[in-house]
Amino acid sequence: MILGYLGLCWLLGMAAAAFTGNPWAIAAAALLAAIVPLVTRRSAVALLWAAMAAAFLVGGAWLYQSSLPSPEPQGIALHNDGPAVRFRAVVSGEPDERGSSLRLRLSAREVLIDGRWQSTSGGILMRSGLFPRYDYGDLLEVNGKLETPPEFEDFDYRDYLARQGIGSIINYPQMSLLATGQGNTIQAWVYDVRGELSSSLEDALPEPEAALAQGILLGRRASLPDDLRQDLNDTNTSHLIAVSGYNVTLVAGLFIGGLAWLIGRRPAAWLALLAIIAYAALVGGQPSVQRAAIMGGMYVVAIALGRQSGALQGLALAGAGMTAFDPLLMKDISFQLSFASTIGLVLFAPALRTRLEAAIARGSSDRELAGPLRGVIELLAVTVAAIAFTLPITAVNFQRISLVAIPANLLTVPAFPLIMIASGLTAVGGMIAAPIGAFLGWITYMPVAYLVHVVRLLADLPFAAASVDGLTTGHALAYYAALASVVWLTARRPGRATSWRASLARAGALPTLGIAIVLALASVLVWLVILGSPGDRLSVTFLDVGQGDAILIRSPAGHNILVDGGPNGEAITAALGRHLAFWDRHLHLVVLTHPDQDHLAGLVTVLERYDVDQVLTPALTDDSPTVRAWQEAIAERDIPQREAFAGQWIDLGGGARLSVVYPPPGFLDAADEDDSSLVLKASLGEAAFLLTGDIGAEEEASLVSNHADLRAPVLKVAHHGSRASTTAAFLAAVAPLTAVISVGEDNSYGLPSPETLARLGARPVFRTDRHGDVEMSTDGERLWVRVGREGE
């Protein structure tokens, strides 16, 4: 009890320094900490505890303030906001691929000054293109302009990075690889294992299910699509993808429950402790992982020793130990949320559950609650407690709160342990053999798809979330004071006492109620996918991948053809996941129209994650990093590659065919790859789709003058609607009934151009920036159109 109180005093001192920085506030908190032992114990020893309490509080405040980064730049940051500088640095963290860029955390080693390399230090956040890819431990030589991180009006980005040891940022510099394996050997091994587990999930699941499974199992959230990430925030279910005490408790429970009958409860607890350590190392060292591992480890050790201690004391000691090691964690939002939710679980959930059970029992003739009903009550109590204790943190920091948090958690939490267990089996199975991972992926997909569907359904409600501007730390303190009164009144309610350990033990039964619902809804999703197959139609879907091109063709014979892949792997895999059945990882043909980044970059990821039979490309002279990565991916997988030219055609089955209209054999314009862009025509009966890549007016004129077969009811407008394409003469030759423009929302190029839209006239024009995915299907006579969202 005393140790727990001292740990609490330490945390209060840290909080007073972090959120007020006022010496008087720290002194007042120290006085309050000293008074409590004097009032509660009333003995001579109380003076000693009072002095220690005040000392721990002041010590915590002093350590936090002394740990704050210096406002003056140091090390490599001395070169911020000046001319370009050349330095050498090691990749010190796991690469983070976000959209069309790669973010790397670097640790500086040397800087070139006056022609001599001099030792330096400091953290750097670098943003570069997707290719070439770099790994943890790579030593890079970088040349570019270092900048001081900015301070935004609603977010102090500079302070956020400074607490991570980063004082400089650099965007798209020149760089070269000098050496590999310069990092910590154990950390490199952990990253390698995490990478293999992630790859197994990516191979077995489509997007966004693969990204969500990675988040739940490994705590990797970078690959989550932005829309799903926002939906998780709006429904207050983002905690499911943050490794928390629930994850660790589940790991411990599986080990202890599974091995207790074989080797005994205490030996099984020691093995569970090793499992917790291994799991925490595997998912990384984030603050939430540390807290969860420490708390779960303390509980397991208590079981092993037969001396289970109080939860609050353990939590206080865990928090004190973590902040003593890294004082700046006190301002980390994920740490605050983890700590607050755990306090809610410990203090509020058991009493709330008891009240709910008592209320239901009074209104029922059957005083003994059924098992499923107990599970619902337990889930409701845990959900309400966690939301109540974290609400002010999310409101103050994000100025937004979820209004559907309780029903969202009630519907999704039962699927969480199923996803975690199934994802783990799938990931490990895929590492052993790809067919094992693919088979287990069928099981994993169902609960993950259910969770995605529920989150998106609730997030689409008009009242799902609300903005709460102007809230401050003072409002949060007032809220917690009121909440403390509610907790105290709830705890005083007569009823059967229940410990937090009993609550957690009973929480293991929570999935039982949700299994039938999860499987039933997942089955409905599977049948919807099956019924949505093209059947006897030719389907051409213009995928919404941002500022880029990607077109999925599905033939009546069931062949999948992908034309271009958009600007990044995240967008194209998410788009394919929306239209291919979750078990369908097969592309019969991948076509690259030309090697621009917005057409090619995503295809590298496609080759890595899908089974591709063959590749069709124009003649390539570009030697960019993206092209090299593309060619390496083809060579590694031994995929047949053919060069395309006008006159070729491919039988797609069922009467459908894909023809190459341009360029002519032997044509190559090395000066402008757009001029060599493939023009394709997909046709069935009287219907046809003309796919024009990025050709310009000169190439269009060549096609018209050579009397190419251009007539098509559907035209994919060239070059995202650039005014340099889609001439009046070309439109007259094609005579389209409708047109589609693949273009990114609010793109910096101002596309599509007003001139192109004017030339298209009164024809119906579908745009991926407004309509999302545009799916057109035909039986050879009629045309059906379905859009992802209603346009303007």
Image (cartoon, rainbow, N blue to C red):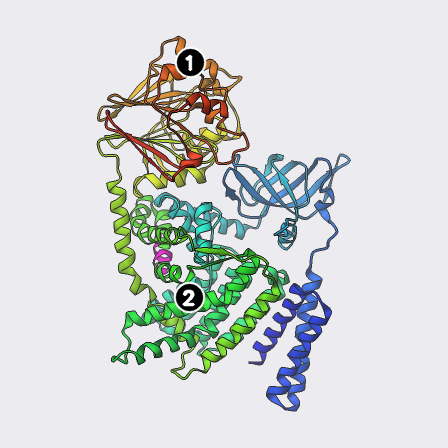
Callout 1: SS: helix
Position in image of residue 205 (x %, y %): 35, 45
Q: Give whichever of 329, 464 is nearer the camera.
A: 464
Location of residue 413 in the rendering, given as x and y in whole percent from the top left corner = 38, 61
Q: Is residue 454 left or right of residue 148?
A: left
Query: For the magenta stretch, what is the residue range?
Result: 417-422
Q: Give the crowd class for mark 1: few <14, some 14-19, many >=20 residues within 10 Å.
A: few
The residue sitting at the right extreme is 114
Q: Position of residue 790 (x, y in %)?
A: 38, 39
* Above or below: residue 339 compared with residue 96: below
Q: Is residue 147 left or right of residue 604?
A: right
Which of marks 2 and 1 precedes in the sequence? 2
Spatial CA distance of label 1 from label 2 is: 64 Å
Residue 495 counted in the magenta span: no
Magenta region's main secondary structure?
A: helix
Q: Residue at x 47, y 46 (%)?
A: 226
Q: Is residue 65 left or right of residue 686?
A: right
Residue that numbered label 1 is attached to: 729
- Residue 420 is covered by the magenta coloring: yes
- Seen in the picture, residue 288 relative to 191 is either above or below; the reply is below
Q: Amino acid at mark 2?
A: Thr
Instruction: Describe the element under mark 2 as helix, strand or loop.
Output: helix
